[in-house]
Image: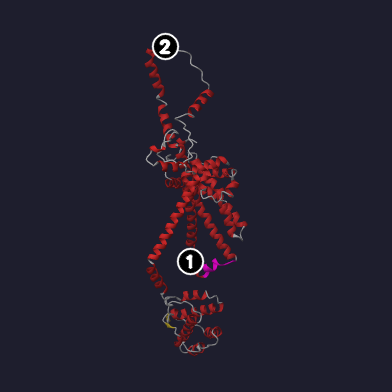
């Protein structure tokens, strides 16, 4: 890994800025990432759909559970693209089976639900660490950025759900109105047959397409968090500065050495040569041991074991030095010196109990102080009367629907009106139908409803005979009201017969 070949600026960033860098990195290579992801995941999704056709939820669950295996492909592409070795889609897909060999079982079992999955995945895949070495590495990486990796996963989950529902809503909005009336979305959602399977698999397909767009970006954000943490820990930015400085000075050093030798040559002579003694040979092991011994001594290493409480600005005191020289009284310092971990734990627990008790007492005091106001407020809320029911409309489409405006035997009256007043006869049947829907079936009709909306509400009653009669009567009513076309004589008699069958031969209300 050559940091000088990095395609991004290597410098410490905040976690949110690092995730923004991941988004930009994913945008730069979006076609490669999305194309390779689609080439790998969509065939697997199609296979799972075929295998679990009768169990769409199982197919979606298995596909979702395999995401860590799919995530290794965009991580491989990003790790190569970062150092100017961007592979092609074909090369990346051909490497995917090899990427699955390392720790795949762990990624799909006990590590599957890790909230920092994308942030920690490079440790296993790129560094190849496992076991205790991996745990030590994770402990160092998660000291400052663990919360960012968790928030990335939480935001990603909500984004997936939002995009999923958004795609379903957009699909529903694009359905033509006539097809929507015949299809009935609610009926399809509650269906258990083949129609319900098609709808569930359609939702699964929307989720698979969303992952083509989002999942590479999620992996890129986790990878950028990992790079930022390593930049802070290993000072990659300083290393790059020193490398650039060395490259600049590499051409100047020989010239400086030559000038130095020429400047010192007049002062060298036989006397210096006679006094010079042969240098003492120092082996590598001896030099290493000397360096190690030097590092174990002050000021490089000052081991000290402290088993008592000590203030941050207090300097270590020797045994001969009295504790009474500080600002605190001697009895207080002696008491602090005798404190240990267990004593401090008990003191902290007591303080916590005291604080919670004070909080509870304060809340109780507030409730007691404002008890009259709370009582008046609660009583006022309880005394509110329920909202009156909405009045039943008395007219629809300009037709009177009151029971008192209709004859007792509607079908017989309509038969008498057919020869001389067909419009009034058909209107009487339609008024009678709307009145029965309002008063007998308690159908929530509104004054602004259209004929089609009335039919939709009748459909929800789930009474096939009533729906068929209402549809036939509405069709003839619209033909007469808007097209001035009378129903044939056979239809006139059939409507009256169907009315008697449905509504008990003109029984009075």
Q: Residue furthest right?
A: 51
Q: Is residue 314 above or below residue 439?
A: above
Magenta region: 182-192
- Which residue is at a point 51% across and 53% down the rendered structure image? 211
Figure quadrant of residue 358: bottom left
For the residues marked 2 and 1, what is the alpha-carbon distance in whole angstroms?
103 Å
Q: Position of residue 272 (x, y in %)?
A: 42, 11
Task: Label 1, secondary structure: give it.
Answer: loop
* Viewer-closest of 205 and 323: 323
Q: Which residue is mark 1?
A: 176
Q: 213 and 387: which one is in front?
A: 387
Residue at horizontal 43%, vertical 47%?
Answer: 16
For the point 37% across and 16% down, the residue is 263
Whether 264 is drawn above or below 156: the answer is above
Q: Nearer the viewer, residue 74 or 421?
A: 74
Residue 224 visible to an observer of this rendering: no
- Does 470 sit above or below residue 254? below
């Amino acid at each position: 890994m050559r940091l000088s070949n990095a395609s991004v600026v290597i410098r410490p960033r905040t976690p949110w800025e690092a995730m923004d860098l991941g988004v930009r990195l994913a945008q730069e290579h979006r076609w490669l990432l999305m194309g390779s992801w689609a080439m790998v995941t969509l065939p697997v999704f199609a296979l799972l759909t075929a295998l679990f056709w009768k169990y769409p939820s199982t197919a979606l669950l298995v596909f979702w559970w395999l995401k860590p295996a799919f995530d290794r492909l965009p991580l491989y592409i990003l790790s190569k693209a970062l150092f100017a070795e961007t592979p092609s889609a074909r090369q990346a897909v051909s490497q995917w089976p090899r990427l699955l060999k390392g720790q795949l079982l762990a990624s799909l079992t006990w590590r599957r639900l890790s909230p920092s999955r994308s942030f920690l995945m490079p440790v296993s895949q790129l560094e190849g660490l496992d076991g205790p070495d991996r745990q030590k590495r994770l402990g160092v990486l998660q000291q400052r950025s663990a919360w960012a990796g968790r928030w990335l996963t939480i935001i990603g989950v909500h984004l997936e759900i939002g995009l999923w529902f958004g795609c379903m809503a957009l699909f529903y909005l694009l359905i033509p109105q006539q097809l929507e009336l015949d299809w009935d979305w609610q009926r399809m959602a509650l269906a258990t047959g083949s129609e319900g399977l098609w709808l569930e698999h359609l939702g699964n397909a929307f989720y698979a397409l969303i992952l083509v767009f989002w999942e590479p970006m999620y992996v890129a954000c986790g990878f950028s968090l990992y790079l930022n943490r390593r930049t802070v820990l290993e000072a990659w930015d300083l290393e790059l500065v020193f490398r650039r400085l060395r490259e600049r000075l590499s051409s100047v050093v020989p010239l400086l050495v030559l000038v130095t030798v020429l400047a010192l040559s007049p002062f060298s002579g036989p006397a210096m040569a006679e006094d010079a003694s042969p240098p003492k040979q120092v082996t590598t092991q001896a030099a290493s041991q000397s360096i190690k011994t030097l590092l174990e001594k002050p000021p490089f290493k000052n081991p000290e074991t402290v088993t008592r409480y000590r203030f941050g600005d207090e300097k270590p005191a020797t045994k001969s030095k009295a504790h009474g020289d500080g600002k605190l009284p001697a009895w207080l310092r002696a008491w602090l010196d005798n404190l240990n971990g267990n004593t401090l734990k008990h003191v902290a627990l007591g303080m916590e109990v005291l604080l919670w008790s004070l909080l509870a007492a304060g809340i109780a005091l507030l409730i007691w102080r404002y008890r009259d106001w709370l009582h008046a407020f609660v009583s006022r809320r309880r005394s509110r009367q329920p909202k009156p029911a909405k009045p039943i409309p008395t007219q629809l489409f300009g037709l009177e629907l009151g029971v008192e405006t209709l004859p007792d035997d509607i079908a017989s009256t309509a038969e008498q009106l057919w020869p001389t007043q067909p419009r009034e006869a058909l209107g009487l049947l339609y008024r009678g139908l709307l009145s029965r829907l309002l008063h007998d079936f308690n159908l929530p009709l509104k004054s602004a409803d259209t004929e089609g909306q009335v039919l939709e509400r009748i459909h929800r009653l789930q009474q096939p005979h009533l729906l068929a009669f209402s549809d036939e009567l509405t069709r003839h009513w619209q033909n007469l009201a808007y097209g001035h076309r009378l129903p044939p004589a056979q239809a006139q008699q059939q409507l009256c017969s169907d009315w008697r069958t449905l509504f008990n031969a003109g029984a009075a209300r």
